[in-house]
Every structure is written in structure tokens, then in C-alpha cells.
Image (cartoon, rainbow, N blue to C red):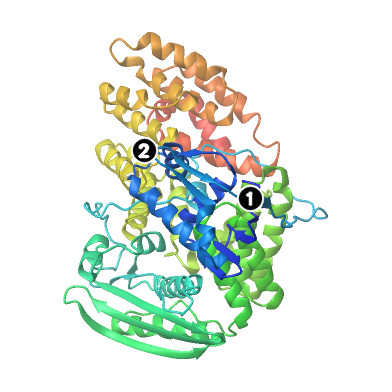
Amino acid sequence: MSALTQGFELEGLQVSPLTGEVSGPGGIAHLEPKVMAVLVLMAEHPGVVMVREDLVTRLWGPVVVTDDALTRCFYELRRHLSQAGGGERYRDLIETLPKRGYRLRAAVKPRTVRPIEAPSDVPAPPAVRRSRPWIAIAAAAVLAAIGVAIYVSRSPQIAELPSGATAVHSIVVLPFLDMSAEKDQGYFADGMAEEILNRLAQSRDLRVIARTSSFALRDKTLDVPQIAARLNVGYVLEGSVRRSGERVRVTAQLIDASTNAHVWSETYDRNLGDALAVQDSIAAAVAAALDASLAGSKALAAPPKAAAYERYLHARFFYNRRGPGDLELMAQYLEEAVAIDPGFAKAWAELAGAYFLLGYENPDAQAAWFSKRGRAALKAVELDPGLATAHLRLAQHYWQTGDPARGDAHWHKAVELDSNDMLLLSMRAGDALSNGDLEQAVQLQRQAVARDPLSAVAHNNLGFYLAATGHYEEALAELHMRYELNPAKEPEHDAEIARVLVLLERFDEASTIIAGMPEGEYRDFALALLYQAPGRKAESETALRRLSSRRSVNSVFLLLEAYAQRGMNDRAFELLHNFRGTIGTDSVNDFAQRNDLRQLLHASPFMRRLSSDSRWDELISELDS
């Protein structure tokens, strides 16, 4: 993370990248995330000419953008600096050098902010090494922060609907508009829409589009019928929030996409403390209009205090944005929420999730973060035994601290309470894969794609599961859809596409993919798979030798597949034996690596070639014990 991310001073202006604010004599200016990213990048290099091409690469990576995108960012940046500074002279802090780039003409002074400290007095499991990202699919679904680029010219293939749902009983909740005078309540409007979405998603009578896909259409110039067609839904719920002090006006309207007619609408004028009740009222009214039941979901018996709830919504905003430092801010706001209202179970459950993610982001302090995660999850379950996310977080804690039986009990309770939860749905698919139920994994992941059709992660995971069941052409389509939704190139995803192409014996196409991959273990793995491609045997052998010399856990899994593909059973089982000897040295790694290995054995068509060997059943039995 940049040292400036926590904030800095610029010619008398106070810049807060984490909140997107620049304050000064003229007031507070709110910058869009990309505009703030431009300012931070320039502030990291004061007095240096930043070339346009370099700026575009740093800010957008491999995504293709026009020059107008960068020009607009600098226009908005100058406008906001002038607004916050209260004078035109602040526009001149950014100098344009024609045909070259831009230069910041100002001194920059970093601001130090005290980070959240993890406790050191509570014993916890030792640190965990990162597992193979394209095998640990359930973990990827939890941890991934994907910036989705939407191409509205093509609709993704919509998978089959969950049992009991039809196109008529399907709905998307769009992000609510912030109609407040200062336009500073975006987090509050987003939180209202997300909570309504989550309440509706608990109904077994509805297919509710997940947040990733519904919020991806924010600011798109699409009308209701176009949105409905894009997401394959029958109804659209849209709304707005206007807040003034402690008063909130919420307007919501349900639209029949087939006729573009209003089915229901209502306006609520309430105190801030009644916001949760408004969400429940809207969800109940929408369900009634669609003749759907919300049975199994319950309103909170004691709504949280208004100040605690507002901090909870702030935390959700930072969780979903997931920029540099946002996880720390998420935890900070949730800690404030439970300090204000210690009985706020949902905030405790979210806090457990924040600590879980911070543990993975900070391996050196992982034991302390995971210990805090366990305490927060226990508190959430104690306060609300009917909260599915609380049981999920507690299940993760027990799994990773050597108590799988208790972990399984809380996992099954979470599924019983809310089987439609998107995170649980993705994890159930990964669990089915770990247990060798490949068809169930595909079925569950198809449901996830139907619920979240614009999610790159959902399509990527479905592609992986389809490859495991031998549906290679369909798998390839889903893996390519991942890149259409998120063009950022990653070597592990390229390797997965190359792997499927090799299984289809389309070696020329695989070679084209591999040629664009950077040097490293994934490229070596993909090259090693070209063993049977005409004229590539020697290059494949060289890549295999390089791969065998690597020492990461990731490379062990890749090497196992390469050995199995070639029929090198003895080498594969020897490597498996040596690797199994490292499992059990600590409870966190034991759980993660055992699960990764189970998924690899069941999901890889190459690894399953070992199943006729007498050593296979013994291996599976050991992992199941």
C-alpha cells in the first residue's frame, strides 16, 4: 500500500484517499475513485513529468481505454482541487506538458494514521501459506475483488434457474440513487438497496440477482426492459434515498419489465433509526406484490442503534469497494458499530469476516487476526443463533483451528438457515467438489451464475467445474466469459484455458495462449502439458524440469497434474507422499491444503487417470479421515 493512501497534505489541502475526500478553505470535494487514484499517483511523484502512456498503464492496467478517459480524470481533478481550495490557483497545481504528460507542482506531506492493532494476548493458529488460487475456488469467491468491466453489446448465457423459480418470479434490485443535497450519502443508498436485496434473496420463491451483477449496471444507459433482458429477470426494483440530518426519505418502485409498468411504489419519511424497518417494509411489500413468501427470514426483534447501523453501512461500502486500506476501514467502522451497540449481531458477524480477510492480507499477523475472528463469530452466534453468516464465520474458525466436527455443525446450520446466500452457494459448490460430487458442484455453480450473471468469478468457477465433468467446450466458453467480464489478464486463468484446450487436443490454440503468458510456474505448467503436441516435446520436457525445481505449494499441485498427464504414476505418488508429510504441521495449513488436494484429485481429468492405481484408494481414504 502506498504511504500516501492513509492521507496527505497538498498546498494546504487535506487529501483522504480512503474516503475520496479533498478538504480545504473552499469546503469538501468528493472525488471518484479513479480521479483520486490519479491524484495519489501524481502525489507519489511530485515535480516529475508523468508520461500519458505510463499513467494509463498504471491506472487501467491491460484494460484498453481511450485518451479521453485520462483527460477527463485530470479535468475532474483540477475542478475538485479548485473547489476544495476555494480558488482557481489550485487548478494550476497540475501542469500539462503538451504531447508528453502531466506534472504536479506542489509539495506533498504524508499524514500518519494509527492502524488498527491486532491483539497479542490471545493464542491462535499459526500463519497459513496461500493455497492454489484456481483450485481453492471457495476461498477465491470469498477473497476476490474483481473490477468488472461490462460490455452491454453481448448478454452472457444464462444458466438454469434454481428449483421453484421462474422468469416471472425473478427480480433485480438496482442501486438506489443518492438524492441528498450534498450527494454524500452514496454509501447509505447502496446499503439500503443491498439490505433489501438480501432480505428478498432469503425467499425460496424468488430468484434475486446478486449484488455484483445488479450494481455492475450502475450508471449504464440502459432502460428497464434492457436491464431485465440483460439479467433475465421479470421485475426491476429501483429507488432513491434523500437524507437531511436525522431524517430520511426513501422512495421505491417495482416495475414489470414486460410492460414497463409500475406494479407497486411507496415513499417513506422516517427518522434515521427507522431505516431498517423501512427496508423490511419494502422487502415485504415487494414479496407480496410478487405473491412470494419471505418465510424463513425474520426481521430483527431489536433494530440496532442508528449510529451503529450507519457505521455498519459505511463498513459494507468499504468491503464492496475493496481498494487499498478498505479492509482496515471496514474493520474500524464495524468495531465502532459494536462499541455503540454491543447487541448488533450482524455487525459482529461482518466483523468476523473483516478479520478473516485481514488475516489473509497480513500473513505476519494472521494468528492474531484469526483469533479476533473467532471471538467476533462466537459473539454473533450468541446474539442471534438464526443468523446464517454468523454460523458460516464460526464454521471457518473451527475448520482452521483443528475442530472440523464443530465447524461442520455450524456450516450445516448456516446452509439450513439461508441456502440462497451467494457466498454459501459458491462454497457449497466447492464443498461438493471436495467430496467428489462433480455433478452437484456444477448444478450449484449454475445456480450461482443464474443469480450473478455478470460475475467474472462465478463464470470462471463454473468453467472449472465443467472441465472437471468433461464438458470441455462449455467450460471453455465460461472461461472466456470470465475475460469478457473482466479483461485483466492473469496467468492462472490463461493456464486453465490452455489446460482445457490441451484436453481438447487443440494444441495450436493452446500454444497461442501460452505465448502471451509471462515467465513463471503457470507458463511452465502449460508448456509441460504440450508433451503430445507435434514438435513440442523437447520444449515441454524443459518446462517440466523448470517446474520440478520450484518449491511453492502451488508448483507442487501443478507438477502433480503434469506427471499424471504423462502417465508418470510413480513420480506422482512419490510427490503426493512427500507433500502429505507436510500436512498436519499446523491446523490452518492442514485444513487448507487437505481441501485443496481433495479438490485437485477430484477435479483434474489428469489426476483422475491415477484412480486405477492401487495406491489411489489409500490416498483418498487418508484425506477423508
Are the residues at dot 1 and dot 2 in contact (C-beta closer than 8 Å)? no
* Residue 129 sits in quarter: top right
Residue 140 in view (yes/no): yes
Spatial separation of the CA atoms under disc 1 and disc 2: 45 Å
Tell me where residue 22 appears, x and y as whole percent: 57, 63
Amino acid on which the number 2 mark rests in the picture: Ala
Task: Tell me which numbered mark, 1 or 2, is placed earlier along the sequence.
Answer: 1
Tell me where residue 520 appears, x and y as whole percent: 49, 24
Tell me where residue 497 appears, x and y as whole percent: 34, 33
Residue 58 versus residue 291: which sits nearer the camera? Answer: 58
Q: Residues within 10 Å of mark 2 (few under 14, many from 20)?
A: many
Q: Residue at x 64, y 49 (%)?
A: 107
Residue farthest toward the right in the current orientation of the protein? 121
Residue 176 versus residue 441: which sits nearer the camera? Answer: 176
Q: Is residue 407 left or right of residue 467?
A: right
Residue 61 versus residue 580: which sits nearer the camera? Answer: 61
Q: Is residue 205 left or right of residue 116?
A: left
Amino acid on which the number 1 mark rests in the picture: Leu
Q: Quadrant of the C terminus?
A: top right
Q: Which dot marks residue 468? A: 2
Q: Which residue, given by chain and number where applicable, does mark 1 sit on? A: 4
User: Disc 1 on helix, strand or loop?
Assistant: loop
Tell me where residue 478 appears, x and y as whole percent: 30, 44
User: Disc 2 on helix, strand or loop?
Assistant: helix
Residue 182 versus residue 274: which sits nearer the camera? Answer: 182
